[in-house]
């Protein structure tokens, strides 16, 4: 067995090249010979990952005020949304009994509302109620009272969970649509579904539990983007968790150049330029392990209750709101190439989407914008054409 949980390093320096690390997107830069485009920067640590704010052509005092406000917001978001913090609003929801009504803050209410919208839009392929499915495969940090799961967390030795857990938690997650959200006299509430599962040999009765990691960082990026606009920032970017980003203009070059790391080796996979847009990305090389040569990643297919087996190694969505695209990249990876291509054609004409899919060891690129994304790895071939703006698979 090979185990690999890669937490990529976030570059500490900010130069005139404006380079950052991204989960699938290794560098974001606007090549420039001077310091004018570098700007001021601040790094944060929230939701178990790094974030960076960069702004150019702003006064230092104004940047300091803005960056403090961003830091306070990220702290509030983590205290609201993190399933690994026992007193967060989401953790309190997770620990509540089936059918219970709990109080939410505005942040958790808004993110849960968006999550329900994305669950409906993707026909359940985005489903934050896969918390226990993630847990039994070893991809979440437990909070107190979440129960014992059948695998060893003390070292890197992993065995696959018993099918009875996989089946039970898959069924539990299908009840996410039954979460009720409402506001009463200025206070926000959520009511859990009454449905529970019990598993042979396990004394606990399990109610629905949530992990909003697949949408929370994108939603935060949208909020920070609004803060930047209100502060009059025109140049720079905000990157959160190496998976969602809001990019404005570069003060010298105009556009930033984004290079994607090869998820199955070294070097670059593809490159594109962007400005005044958001992006989100998901990939199976962020958190994964291998057992007997088979890869198990943190992206759970809600239809199976297990890590995806679609062959999709990465999905990047450029355009639209970052919160929506954050959820979409997860859903598209779970759908697989045919269903994902159909979904893109029917719903994402306003976005530029690229997927890297591996079939029989061969890497195939599928995109609705082949003129926008430059494929840098000669071993990966474009596996579709575009007709009338729609993907046509080869």
Image (tube, rainbow, N blue to C red):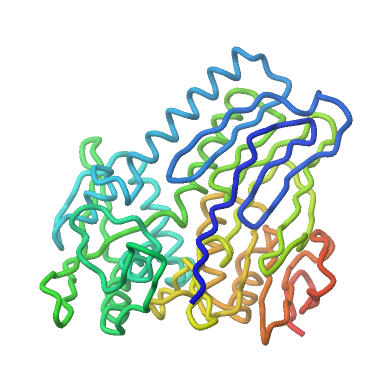
**In the image shown, does 118 or 210 lie closer to the viewer?**
210
The answer, for residue 321, to whether it is visible in the render is no
Looking at the picture, tell me which residue is in the foreground, 96 or 84: 84
Residue 394: image quadrant is bottom right
Instruction: Evaluate whether residue 231 shows in this view.
Output: yes
Vertically, is 347 above or below 81? Answer: below
Taking the image as shown, residue 142 lies to the left or right of residue 306, namely: left
Residue found at the very far left of the displayed protein: 203
Q: Locate residue 352: give its quadrant.
A: bottom right
Question: Which residue occupies the extreme bottom position in the image?
Answer: 360
Picture quadrant of residue 269: bottom right
Residue in the picture at 52% in, 48% down: 218
Image point (47%, 29%), residue name: 71
Q: Left or right: where does residue 192 sit relative to residue 374?
A: left
Q: x, y (%) of residue 243?
A: 57, 52
Name the residue at 18% across, 75% down. 197
| Percent coordinates x, y for residue 24 in the rendering | 64, 57
Q: Is residue 295 above or below residue 252?
A: below
Number of callouts in the render? 0
Question: Where is residue 58 drawn, in percent x and y?
Answer: 68, 19
Q: At which x and y percent is residue 344?
A: 63, 69
Q: Nearer the viewer, residue 368 or 87?
A: 87
């Amino acid at each position: 067995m090979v185990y690999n949980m890669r937490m990529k390093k976030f570059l500490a320096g900010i130069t005139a090249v404006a380079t950052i690390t991204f989960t699938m997107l290794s560098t974001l830069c606007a090549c420039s010979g001077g310091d004018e485009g570098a700007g001021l920067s601040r790094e944060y640590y929230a939701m178990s990952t790094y974030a960076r704010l960069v702004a150019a052509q702003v006064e230092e005092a104004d940047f300091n005020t803005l960056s403090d406000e961003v830091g306070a917001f990220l702290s509030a978001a983590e205290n609201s949304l993190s399933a690994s913090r026992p007193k967060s609003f989401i953790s309190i929801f997770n620990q509540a009994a089936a059918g219970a009504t709990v109080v939410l803050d505005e942040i958790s209410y808004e993110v849960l509302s968006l999550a329900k919208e994305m669950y409906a839009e993707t026909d359940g392929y985005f489903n934050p109620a896969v918390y226990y499915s993630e847990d039994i495969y070893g991809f979440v940090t437990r909070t107190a009272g979440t129960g014992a799961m059948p695998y060893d967390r003390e070292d890197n030795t992993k065995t696959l969970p018993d099918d009875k857990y996989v089946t039970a938690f898959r069924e539990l997650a299908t009840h996410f649509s039954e979460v009720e959200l409402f506001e009463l006299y200025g206070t926000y509430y959520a009511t859990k579904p009454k449905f529970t599962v019990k598993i042979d040999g396990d004394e606990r009765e399990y109610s629905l539990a949530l992990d909003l990691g697949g949408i929370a960082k994108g939603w935060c990026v949208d909020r920070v983007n609004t803060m930047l606009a209100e502060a009059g920032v025109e140049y720079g970017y905000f990157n959160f968790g190496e998976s969602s980003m809001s990019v404005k203009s570069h003060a010298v070059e105009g556009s930033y150049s984004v290079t994607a790391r090869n998820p199955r080796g070294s070097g670059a996979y593809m490159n594109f330029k962007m400005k005044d847009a958001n992006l989100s990305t998901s990939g199976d090389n962020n958190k994964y392990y291998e057992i007997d040569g088979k890869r198990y990643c943190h992206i759970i297919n809600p239809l199976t209750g297990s890590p995806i087996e679609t062959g999709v190694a990465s999905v990047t969505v450029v355009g639209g709101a970052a919160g929506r695209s954050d959820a979409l990249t997860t859903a598209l990876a779970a759908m697989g190439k045919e269903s994902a291509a159909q979904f893109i054609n029917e719903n994402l004409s306003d976005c530029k989407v690229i997927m890297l899919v591996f079939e029989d060891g061969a890497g195939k690129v599928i995109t609705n914008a082949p003129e926008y994304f430059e494929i840098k790895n000669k071993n990966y071939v474009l596996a579709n054409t575009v007709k009338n703006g729609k993907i046509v698979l080869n």
